[in-house]
Image (spheres, rainbow, N blue to C red):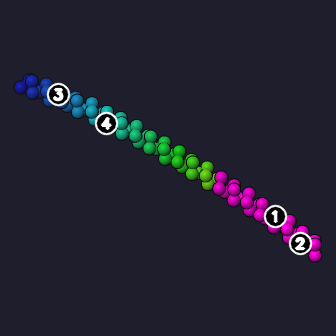
Amino acid sequence: MQAVAAVAAQAAATVAAAARAVAAVVAVVVVEVVVVVVVVVIVVEVVVVVVVVVVVVVEVVVSSSRSSSSSSSSSSR
């Protein structure tokens, strides 16, 4: 009977150790997923800022080009 109890205690200890190991792995995976999501969000924000800057620069260039061509055409008349 003591042998069965010892085997059961050993099995319980092994299961508990395995559960702790699995919990540690799951925690590491969750942290890595969160880090990846944060990095993706930062990259998307940077891309959005770059696109906005490019659009603003293009609008300024087009606007100045239109105003200069408009003023040159009106002065030639």
| Residue 70 sits inside the magenta stretch | yes
Which of the 4 quarters of the picture holds residue 22? top left
How far apart marks 3 and 2 lie (CA) works out to 95 Å
Residue visible at 69% across and 59% down in the picture = 55
> Which numbered disc, 4 or 1, marks the residue closer to the eye?
1
User: Marks 4 and 3: which is nearer the front?
Assistant: 4
**Crowdedness near tag 3: few (<14), some (14–19) or many (≥20) residues, C-alpha within 10 Å:** few
Residue drawn at x 28%, y 35% is 19
Q: Main secondary structure of the magenta part?
A: helix
- State whether residue 66 is above or below residue 27: below
Q: CA distance from mark 4 to mark 3?
A: 20 Å
Magenta range? 50-77
**Residue at mark 2:** 73
Q: Tell me if label 2 and label 1 are in contact, CB under 8 Å.
A: no
Q: Residue 47, how many percent across, how many down?
A: 61, 52
- Which quadrant of the view contains residue 76? bottom right
Q: Amino acid at mark 2?
A: Ser
On screen, residue 22 above or below 6: below
User: Residue 52: percent from the left, percent from the top?
Assistant: 66, 57
Foreground of the two, 46 or 1: 46
In front of the other: label 1 or label 3? 1
SS under mark 2 = helix
**4 with respect to 14 (left or right):** left
CA gap between label 1 and label 3 equals: 83 Å
Q: Tell which circle, 2 or 1, labels the residue nearer the N-terminal end.
A: 1
Numbered mark located on residue 9 in the image: 3
Q: Which residue is mark 1?
A: 65
Q: Secondary structure at mark 3?
A: helix
Q: Amino acid at mark 3?
A: Ala
Front residue (pair 51, 27):
51
Q: Quadrant of the N terminus?
A: top left
